[in-house]
Image (spheres, coloured by chain):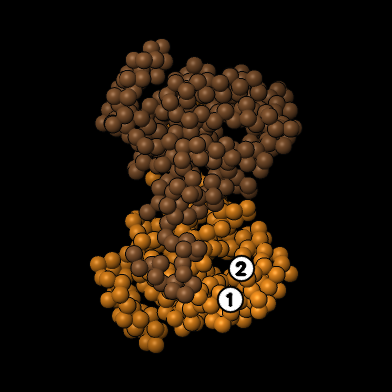
Chain colours: A brown, B orange
Amino acid sequence: MRPKMILFGDSITEDSFGDGGWGASLAHHFSRSLDVILRGYSGYNTRWVLKVIEKVCNGESPIGMTVFFGANDASLPDRTSAFQHVPLHEYKQNLQSIVSFIKVPTSLSFYNSFTVQQSVMSGSKPKDSESLLHAYLPFRKWPTALILLITPPPIDEDGRIRHPFGDNPSGLSERTNEAAGAYAKACVEVADECGVIGVDLWTKMQQYPNWEKSCLSDGLHLTPTGNKIVYEEVIKKLTKEGVTVETLSADLPLLSQIDPCDPLKAFQN
Amino acid sequence: MRPKMILFGDSITEDSFGDGGWGASLAHHFSRSLDVILRGYSGYNTRWVLKVIEKVCNGESPIGMTVFFGANDASLPDRTSAFQHVPLHEYKQNLQSIVSFIKVPTSLSFYNSFTVQQSVMSGSKPKDSESLLHAYLPFRKWPTALILLITPPPIDEDGRIRHPFGDNPSGLSERTNEAAGAYAKACVEVADECGVIGVDLWTKMQQYPNWEKSCLSDGLHLTPTGNKIVYEEVIKKLTKEGVTVETLSADLPLLSQIDPCDPLKAFQN
């Protein structure tokens, strides 16, 4: 009855229907035109995502999908969240694979097509890659879905030290803003290489005054202000792609379309 | 992949993903176990709902569905929102029909079965009605769906006069708390007669101190406090029926189920 938009990500997505959350704001904004479907998995990195993507990306194509991973991959390998760490080069490959999974023929096994996709996505031969990717277009799993790759947010190390997950005897932050920035850069590169939409949240958020405390509640997760930035960036990108309340059709007649003198007329079709 | 819960109602449902909204709170609460699907139609009364119910109640059965109408039906017939008014006896019949639509065999046309359903639901012969309804059980459209019939909220007439919809030269409220109360009573009666879950929001909300201003933003729509009451009442009823985060299975392994020493083990099945 309505197109859907899937929000796929880690805890920053799973929490996005909390107070002032960016997911709830999207659902509210599109309350008569889109179903906003929550697929947030707290703590997940891209390595784990590749183990579950066939379960998550299933069924009818969404009109759009946010893919918002990297905050856990960027955990430092020698601190308390080391088990979530994924090396930078693997993170980049994994993001490419996630995009590829949505783009390649469903009849091809994901792992069999991985090597081909790697060459497609590597960007080393732009012209060839482009034509090979183009050849794939008619067969993509969700060919019309808009993919929005969102970078991890910046990190406030002071906030992480004050609000550690469980015991942290070292007193050192398990994440750094520098590491998050490297993963964000890789994410933007993948978006460019794969021809999907990139949202550089890491850069955008640091343009806000006192972003460390105004946008982040614990140095990593989002305050209402931080949520608002994500919401606004996603809306901006969707608008640019022509996905707006105005262009989507409303589900059933709007009150403004109902004639007070003959209300039932609006329901004749 | 996940069961769903449908929120079907008027503007109080359509707005339920706004700031502090009860719909967003439900989606947040069940963020790993249920898809909360918004089907709110601002301004709709039960007469209009019967024209669209076949489009809305379609597809796979939800685990639960809130049916939250009456605030518009209860608009007074001689004031500014008269075109939304539905007489009390018709409102009651319409609610019965909505429940019947979800409960009767899909192969029977809704309108053909209306007369039969009317006799089933009338409650005049409780024993007979009960056995007839029981006979229908295996054929219901969504036999396992929990239906939560929510009454209209109370009305703060002062708030309505201060915040009218459009022009209101009479200066009189287009809704009264007394009328809303009569519709609320009818709603609870239908829930009892049909054997579905009733949520008497009209009574519950008036137990809160200063409910007129603390629960209602314009005498009709909900403040965050008002939203919290709806959320808590829905959770209470779902819990009583055994629908909780604990009883529903989480979609994919929770972070707490992932062994930090061997994270990929959790994804082997």
The amino acid sitting under disc 2 is Phe
Image quarter in which the N terminus of chain B is found: top left
| Residue name at image x 68 percent, y 73 percent | B161
| B216 up-or-down from A73: above or below | below
| Contact, mark 2 vs mark 1 (Cβ under 8 Å) | yes
Indicate left or right for B17 with B4 as reference: right
The amino acid sitting under disc 1 is Thr
Indicate left or right for A50 with B85 as reference: left
Q: Report the chain holding disc 1.
A: B
| A215 up-or-down from B56: above or below | above
| Residue name at image x 70 percent, y 74 percent | B158
Q: Position of residue B246 (x, y in %)?
A: 51, 50
**Label ID, residue B69:** none
**Label ID, residue B80:** 1
Q: Position of residue B114 (x, y in %)?
A: 32, 77
Q: Which residue is mark 2?
A: B165
